[in-house]
Amino acid sequence: MIYDAIVVGGGLAGSTLAKNLREHGYRILVLECETRFKDRVRGEQMHPWGVSAARRLGIYDELLASCGNQTRWWTTWIGGRAIFNRDLQTTAPHGVGSFNFYHPTMQETLLGLAERAGAEVWRGATVESVIAGSPPQVRVRHHGTTTFVQGRIVVGADGRNSLVRSRAGFPSVRDPDLLITTGLLCEGVPAPENATHHGVGAAEGATLVAPLGNQRARVYFIYRKEDGLRGLAGQGRVGDFLSLCARCGVPAEWCADAKAAGPLAEFNGAEHWVSHPARQGVVLVGDAAGATDPAWGTGLSITLWDVLTLRDCLLSNPDWEAAIHQYALEHDRYRRALHDVTQCFTELLWTTGQAAEERRSRVLPTLLTDAQGLPDVIGLGPESPMNTEIRRLFMGETQSASA
């Protein structure tokens, strides 16, 4: 069985790529291990630069209609008070706010779009091996039968623990451990649904409330690994989780009235990635190519940047082996740029000690009132300005000219 592209993974990256390539006449096979998508803790909030990519890829309207909540504002809370409201439509160059959606419905919606576009989809498919080469091959077990399929390329879109990445022999690099992210789908959260809410505690950590509509929200709590919290997962810890979130600046009644509507789980936020995620007909996108620290909420956005970049490389170059290497070079460039930005914020907001506190007291007022020309995870992501002087200013080592 020979295809133009074999896409392993039918989530955000895989289904979106399959839909786009099929619409240009290519024969596409999607291999998805799950027969029914279940709720798991993962990112469900997309920054404006990701929303822009979703529009260009032709998936935004369907997601908005099926499961999306488009917000306009980014609200920062301290001590139960909204100390800053950022209008993302006017302050981000993409002219749109954040976009929140329920993950299982997103997956079903996009896989359905790929099928309607004409992609062949095998659900309940288990990938047993990936053989790089010309052409690359995949050995897959489906409906009790093991089959070899070939494609011009094989696309690994199978997430943080990618089997394609490991079985095709891609080495990965990992940052040191620092932050832990815990998440829970909640009902009965009376937070304004036209904003994404960021709460900052004095020492406990931080929380993010991403409204999904109808008083449902994905709620996250982020803390330093060194702070000593352990095992903040499972139904028995829901009360502890909501109590910690309530101490992170958002109105306490949001957490007091909230009820668990899904599993509570936590995961290590250390970023890991593949340098040059393309070799011998196999190419990686999304978390398979590089899993960003979920504390900064960039995973969904950079996933769609990957899909958009790979799509455009494939459509513009009939030599697909050359095209995937062109994509890999571009991927490495913007992944490094985004990593530089998130590392700046990590150093500023999560380091401890008197010097760190003094630096925050100098820099945070500027970030909340006049961040023009400084790194911006939410509005700009990998397009953020960054050089030695900007980094020194951002880290409080120099003063702005106006100061």
Image (cartoon, helix red, strand yellow):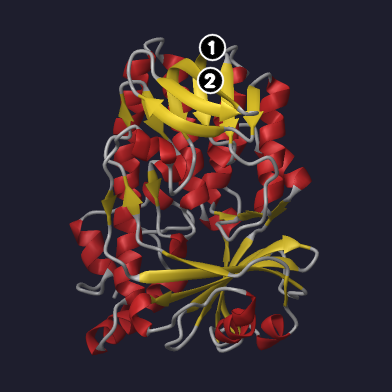
Query: Going 31% across and 73% down the picture, which residue do you hit?
Result: 348
Q: Position of residue 82 (x, y in %)?
A: 60, 80
Residue at image coords 58%, 85%: 240
User: Is 201 drawn above or below residue 261 in the view shown?
Assistant: below
Q: Relative to 137, does residue 99 appear above or below in the rendering? A: below
> Is the residue 291 above or below the residue 358 in the image?
above
For the residues bearing labels 2 and 1, Cβ distance under 8 angstroms: yes
The residue nearer to you, when weighing 350 against 112, is 112
Q: Quadrant of the N terminus?
A: top right
Residue located farthest toward the right when viewing the structure as drawn: 214
Q: Within 10 Å of the Cα at label 2, are there few (<14), some (14-19), or many (20+) other Cα atoms?
A: few
The answer to whether residue 391 is left or right of residue 204 is left
- Which of 84/337 is in front? 337
Residue 60 position within the rendered picture, expressed as x and y whole percent measured from the top left: 66, 40
Quadrant (top left, top right, bottom left, bottom right) of the C terminus: bottom left
Residue type indicated by callout 2:
Thr
Question: In terms of sequence position, does the residue under pointer 2 or pointer 1 come before the other?
Answer: 1
SS class, disc 2: strand
Q: Is residue 372 visible?
A: yes
Residue with the mark numbered 2: 147
Q: Amino acid at mark 1?
A: Met
The residue tagged 1 is 1
Q: Secondary structure at mark 1?
A: loop
Residue that appears at 31% across and 67% down: 177
- Residue 305 percent coordinates (x, y): 46, 39
Picture disc at residue 70:
none
90 left or right of 355?
right
